[in-house]
Amino acid sequence: MASFLSIPGRDKLEAKFRRAVKSFLKQTHQDKELIIIADGCEKTIQIYSQEFSSYDNIKLIPIPKQPFYSGTMRNIAFQDSDGDIIR
């Protein structure tokens, strides 16, 4: 999950981020992981540290800001995933 919460003109990005992570946590499949790529975003790192860092199946990977629609974030997540199936 790519995350950059500082987009001008976009409302409620932090709330949407929290809702997406909480939705992941509510899923009933037991063998799952969420990899969050913080695309140069300190807000993402802060929210993860305060609210989600205690979950073993959620990882945060902070990287420098990437160009929009760059495949870098997805490739980093693929490389760091532990699962056999990636969606």
Image (cartoon, rainbow, N blue to C red):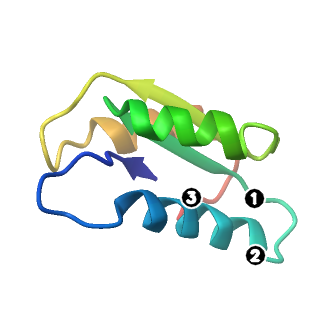
Q: Percent from the top left, x then y, of residue 57? A: 77, 47
Residue found farthest to the right = 30
Closer to viewer: mark 2 or mark 3: 2
- Can residue 82 be seen at all in this image of the molecule? no
Residue 52 falls left or right of residue 71: right
Mark 3 crowdedness (10 Å alpha carbons): few <14, some 14-19, many ≥20: few
Q: Secondary structure at mark 2?
A: loop
Closer to viewer: mark 1 or mark 3: 1
- How far apart marks 2 and 1 lie (CA) works out to 9 Å
- Amino acid beneath label 3: Ile
Residue 66 falls left or right of residue 56: left
Which one is nearer the viewer's eye here, 36 or 86? 36
Q: Residue at x 70, y 49 (%)?
A: 83
User: Who comes first in sequence, dot 2 or dot 1?
Assistant: 2
Residue 27: which numbered mark, if any?
2
Q: Residue at x 12, y 37 (%)?
A: 67
Q: Secondary structure at mark 1?
A: loop
Q: Percent from the top left, x then y, of residue 41? A: 35, 34
- Amino acid beneath label 2: Gln
User: Who comes first in sequence, dot 2 or dot 3?
Assistant: 2
Which one is nearer the viewer's eye here, 62 or 70? 62
Residue 60 falls left or right of residue 14: right
- Can residue 30 be seen at all in this image of the molecule? yes
Are circles 1 and 3 on residues that touch, CB within 8 Å? no
The residue that disc 3 covers is 86
The residue that disc 1 covers is 32
- How far apart marks 2 and 3 lie (CA) works out to 15 Å
Q: Residue at x 57, y 45 (%)?
A: 35
Q: Relative to 23, does residue 9 appear above or below in the rendering?
A: above
